[in-house]
Amino acid sequence: MKQLFFLAPGDLAWDDVEAPVLEGPGEAIVKPLAVARCDLDAAIVGGEAPFRGRALHFLRNHLPERVGQKGLFKNAPFRGPYPLGHECVAEVLAVGSDVTSFAKGDRVVVPFQISCGACERCKRGLTASCTGVPPRSMYGFGALGGMRWGGMLCDAVRVPFAEAMLVAAPKGVPNALLASTGDNVVDGYRTVAEPLAKTPRAPVLVVGGLATSVGLYAVACARALGASEVVYHDVNRDRLELAEKLGAKVVEGPYRTQRGGYPITVDASATPAGLAAAMLSTEPGGTCTSVGIYYDERTPVPLRGAYGIGLTFVTGRVQARTELPHVLALLADQRLDITAATTLVARWDDAAEAMKHRGAKVVVSRD
Ligand SMILES: [Zn+2]
Ligand SMILES: [Zn+2]
């Protein structure tokens, strides 16, 4: 079958690989129908994420003060070639004999993280840290996530724990809207869902940036979950326009602390200034969640200011499988509208070019 590979920033190519087969009775083989580009894919393909050989480019853009420092990206995680794509809605092609909840022809969403559903961590909802598979097991991240899982821009994907991982796609919701739910949408959702359950109708501040669509999905989810006001702060005009379409009041300009204080704040900037703006805009007793990935262990964190405020700071990878049913229910009820976040829906055969698109969210669809 054809599989799209990431080779190096700006360089993608289709190659012929052997299609996966069922390797056990609890597995499924699915055919991706629509695949979305994750924010991290966009950064990797665009050369914005730490990538050996492109470290200088990243430094100049994001950490100019570190230019000239040696060895900063010695352990840069993303090196091609590897099969790209880890967010998809798919059709079940085959299931093993132990799989009873799904059958050939079913439409399903596949979370990007591999989780067994049976270990102690999975049972606690910590599906990002399943102990039934090697740490960080996930689709579409090459060696970092485990090469054997493959990517999703292909005709067949093996799901090792079908009952535990797959979630039925809600009827009537188009593939293009479901494509990103296995990762970026749930990532946006978790930044606001629990805090809004704790403090209903609270106003929310989202500081947007490099986790582009996650920040936008946080806006949409906050609106869907009844936030009294959603403010989106960013330095980028295109992202601000999208946030406004999704229902946010927007604040343009350099990242800075927003007056008034918000019980719920989100850092999707992945920049030290954005992180500081989100943390220091949090109201006493509030919750600040950061979805940005900070590659530099020495990223400054404004702990003195945070101490003065008194807040809960949350970071870490999303528990994709645990959150997924909640997001799909919101989409099924038409309470969550994420349409405006998608800036390009491309044909399947055009995936290699589409992945380089500069907008917030690309969906490649067979429709
Ligand atoms: Zn992702
Ligand atoms: Zn597990």
Image: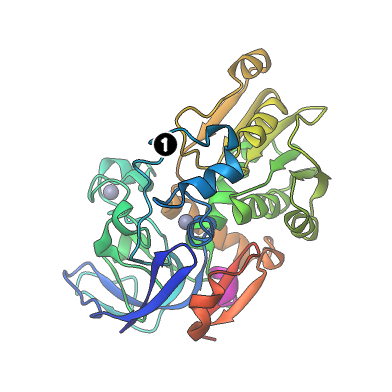
Q: Quadrant of the N terminus?
A: bottom left
Type of residue at label 1? Leu
Closer to the camera in the image, 16 or 282: 16
Q: What residue occupies the far left of the structure in this picture?
A: 24
* Tally of marks: 1
Q: Is residue 262 above or below residue 156?
A: above
Report whether 282 appears left or right of 155: right
Q: Considering only vertical position in the picture, is 239 above or below 319?
A: below
* Label 1 SS: loop
Residue 92 visible in rendering: no
Q: Position of residue 105 (x, y in %)?
A: 39, 84
Image quadrant in which the C terminus is located: bottom right
Q: At 46% across and 32% down in the image, what residue appears?
A: 69
Residue shown at the point (75%, 55%) measured from the top left? 243
The magenta stretch is: 173-178
Residue 177, picture quadrant: bottom right
**Is 239 on the left-hand or right-hand side of 121?**
right
In the picture shown, does residue 243 fall above or below 305?
below
Residue under the point 62% across and 53% down: 212
Q: Nearer the viewer, residue 58 or 251?
A: 58
* Magenta residues, dominant SS class: helix
Point out residue 234 in the picture as x, y percentages from the top left corner: 74, 45
Rendering coords of residue 202 (x, y %)? 74, 37
Asked where in the image residue 228 lies, by quadrant, the reply is top right
